[in-house]
Image (cartoon, rainbow, N blue to C red):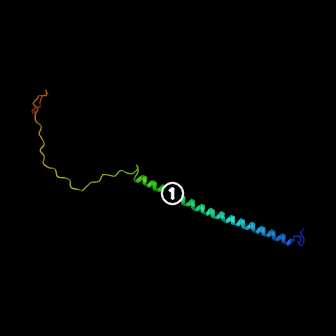
Amino acid sequence: MASGSKPPSGKDRAGRAARERARLYQARAAYHQGQQRRRTRDNWTAGIVAGVLILGAIGSQVLYYTVGPAAPEPAPTQTTSPSPTPTQTTSPSPTPSATPTGEPVPGPTETP
């Protein structure tokens, strides 16, 4: 023992133990609060990512069925625009050929 110092009393020992318990309690409380903040942040992040994935899936399905290969074929529509009037054209009439084909030419049939 050093000169002028006295042996530790019971009050000092109890106070030191109480300070240690308070320090450990504060450390555990701070750790627990940090865990709660991390869980909250992770839940928000997971919710946002899930929402983006769901919206992306819905958007891709809408695009696939409206623009992609699964898009319905457009139905033909009737136009109400006036059609051009036919013009008088002279069509060439068949002319008899000069060479005989060897087939008998059917004549008028007589009825009995």
Q: Is residue 5 left or right of residue 24?
A: right
Name the residue tied to disc 1. 54
Quadrant assignment, res 105: top left
Q: Which quarter shows the N terminus? A: bottom right
Residue 2 locus on image (x, y percent): 89, 69
Residue at the (65%, 64%) spot, across then down: 36
Q: Is residue 76 left or right of residue 19?
A: left
Could you say which is closer to the camera, residue 7 or residue 91?
7
Residue at the (10%, 36%) spot, across then down: 95
Could you say which is closer to the camera, residue 27 or residue 107?
27
From this view, report whether residue 21 is shown above or below residue 107. Answer: below
**Crowding near the residue tagged with mark 1, few <14, some 14–19, many ≥20 C-alpha atoms within 10 Å:** few
Secondary structure under badge 1?
A: helix
Residue 16 locus on image (x, y percent): 81, 69
Residue at the (85%, 72%) spot, across then down: 11
Q: Amino acid at mark 1?
A: Ile
From this view, report whether residue 42 is shown above or below residue 94. Answer: below
Q: Which quarter shows the C terminus? A: top left
Could you say which is closer to the camera, residue 81 or residue 60?
60
Q: Is residue 38 left or right of residue 49?
A: right
Q: Residue furthest top?
A: 102
Residue 5 locus on image (x, y percent): 88, 72
Residue at the (78%, 67%) spot, across then down: 20
